[in-house]
Structure formats: structure tokens, C-alpha cells
Image: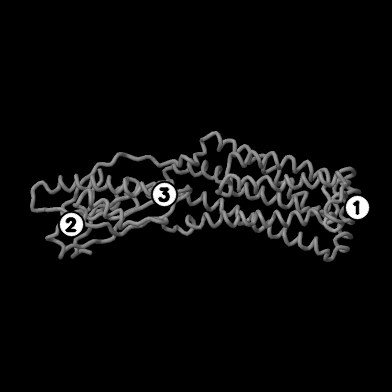
Amino acid sequence: MSSVRTNGPMLLTSSPPMSPPVPLEENPAKPSQAFVRFLMVLLIILMGSQYTYGVFVHSAFLSMQFAGSALLFLSAAESYWWIVFAKKSNHQGIRLLSRYPLNYFFSVNVICFRTAGTIFYIACLFLNLTHCLEDISDINDSGHTEHSNETAEALTDSAGTFGELFEEAGHGHGINPLILYGSVVDLAIKTAFAFSYNSLSIHFFGNFFVMVSPPLLTLAVYAHQLREVDLFGDWLEDHLEPSATIVLTVMCISIAFWSLSKKKQFLLAEGPKNFEIDKISKAVKSKNDRLEKVDHVHASCEWPEGFTVSLKAYIKVEKSKKDWVSRAADDYSQLKSLLHQEIKSQGAKEVIVEPVFVDQREMTDFVDPICISPSCHNENVGCCTIPKPVGEA
């Protein structure tokens, strides 16, 4: 049972016990989430290989592939976080979190993971873009070549055949077998990820393009170099890798910024667009004139879609009648249902209605404190504490 505040006697309303909600769209128990965690193991191995090889040999294509791997790793880490948090939330020591819906913590952390991954991805692409611009401008070309030759000779002396593979890479204007084989593996893993996990939280094709275009472009340039056909002129053929990377980087960065713009309303807790509470209030009043007004409305977007609304519904009562309590309870039940219906028709996922019962004859002495209690939100009621008398406040 939960008590509901009035400006007179307390009303009791029954509320069924509610278990912590588990987001259906992001439930880690789903097979797709288990598959994502399996892909994460492969991704960690791939990302480690890309980073290690990239330390010794600069390759614009490899850097783009590493950026995509880092994006997936940081974003998909939410799957592991959810498992850990779900286990801890059952522990008695974590009960202090129960005053807030479990969906709240899940949504906040998911959006943080994916935003962090997108920002790191943009940073990696921007750094790689500066290197590519340096490559096509041929600044300090002789210095880079000399340094690359020294590195290749040292690797060749210490690692034999493996060192020869590094030597073939030069300063990133060629694609050696290690980069080629790594691109094939990268393409396979990123394709599987693209069909099972949307790291950018945008349209499937935009996310798919960001994931698979770097390895695909690497393979396409390698196939072009095997043909030994001069299609683009001497200068562009010599700078084909950095030039192609610049074009692809601009496209991928644009998609990443678009992804961030889509998350802005959730990151900043903005209100939903085209949500007009006045129209909703009028529609409800036309069906039940016991509604005095709707006030203290709080609406915020919630990940991954929809929004939540909490509000106060001021309900008219006549305390001079003996059965006013039962009538007030019936009016509240009907008005709550109508408000839920009208607001959810506009896309709301959760609606919390706090009733305030008002007798027109007592309006001069009426005190309306703001006391919405988060602990009652789980019961979808709102404030359920007994307000202090005015003299004790």
C-alpha cells in the first residue's frame, strides 16, 4: 500500500510490487548480446595486433581500422558493465540505488560508453588525418624515409623474415602482406559486429559504412596496386593511400559527428519535441472535468528512444460529502489512466502522476509543497509522504 498526499486526510492506493525493469532492447541475456561479447574477445586480439604493428610501421589504412576497433571496444564494453552491475544490484549493499529505476542507470551508462567510443574514434581519425596531410605534402619526406629505413633494417636483423615484412611497408605508401591479412580479419569481425551491434546508434547503413569501409578500401587499393595500371597519374598513384584515406576520413568523421548530434538530447536531458502538455490537459478535461489543472511537468528524453514524464494532477474534491474519499480515489484512477493514455500516445515510455486533491473552499489555506519523492517513482505514484503542517514546516 502507498499513501497519497491530499490537503486533508490521506488516501491509500494499492500498488503491486514491481521488480527492477530490464531494458528489452538491450537485454544482455539475448543471444545477440552473448555473440557481441564473443566478438569482443576477437576484437581485443585484433586491436592489440593493430596497435603493436602500428607502433613500428605507419599505415593510414591500418590507423583507420584501429580507430574503428577502438570505437567498438569502448562502446560494446556496456555489455560487460551490465552483467557486473546486474549482479551487484542484487546485493544488499547496493540497495541504496533502488530509489531510482534500474533503467536510469542502464541508460546513463550506455550513452556514456557509446559517446566515449565515438569521441575517441573522432580523435584517432583526426590524428591520422594530420599524418595523411603531411604525407601528401611531402614535408620532411627524406627524414621519414631515412627513419623508416633504419627501423626496417633493425627489424630485419632481429626478426629475419618477419622483419622483411615490416621493411616492405616503407612509410605507408604500400600495403604489405601483414596489413593485407589483418584487413581480411578486420573486415570479417567488423561485418559481424555491424549486423549484431550498432556502436554509433544511428541508421544501420551509416554504422555499417563506418565499420567496413576502411578494410574494404585497403583491399581495393591493394587489388589496384597488383594490376600495376596507372589510372590516376604519377603523383596520385604515389600518394594513393593517404589521398584515399583523407576522403574516407572526412566521410567517417561526418557520420560520427552526426551520431553525437543524435545523442545530444539524451546527454543534455532535453525535453521531447512537439510535446504540448496544454493540449493533453484540455483533452483529459473534456473527458473528466474533475481535473483542475496539470502542473510541475518534467519531461526528459530517455535512451534509446521515447521520454519520461512526471507531473502533478490537481483533482477537484468536495469534502462536505461523506463519500468524497471514494469519489476522489475513483477520479484519480480514471484521470491517471487518461493522462497515461494521452501522454504515451505521443511517445512517452513512462508517466508518473502525482495526485493533489483540492477542495475549492479551502484554496485560501492550501499549501502545495514540492515533495516528489524518487522512492515512489518505482510505484508510478509520485509523492507518498505525509506533509508537515504549516506550523511545523
Q: Which residue is mark 1?
A: 153
The residues tagged by marks 2 and 3 sit, at their Cα atoms, a distance apart of 34 Å
| Label 2 environment density (alpha carbons within 10 Å; few <14, some 14–19, many ≥20) | many
The residues tagged by marks 3 and 1 sit, at their Cα atoms, a distance apart of 59 Å
349 or 342, which is in the foreground?
Answer: 342
Q: Which residue is mark 3?
A: 97
The residues tagged by marks 1 and 2 sit, at their Cα atoms, a distance apart of 87 Å
Q: Which residue is mark 2?
A: 358
321 or 213, which is in the foreground?
Answer: 213
Q: Which label lies toward us, 3 or 1? A: 1
Q: Amino acid at mark 2?
A: Val
Q: Amino acid at mark 1?
A: Glu
Q: Quadrant of the N terminus?
A: top left
The vertical placement of 30 against 81, above or below, is above
Q: Amino acid at mark 3?
A: Leu
Say left or right for 207 vs 184: left
Visual colour scheme:
one colour
Label 2 element class: strand
Q: Earlier in the sequence, mark 2 or mark 3?
A: 3
Say left or right for 286 vs 35: left
Q: Position of residue 284 (x, y in %)?
A: 26, 51
Q: Position of residue 333 (x, y in %)?
A: 23, 45
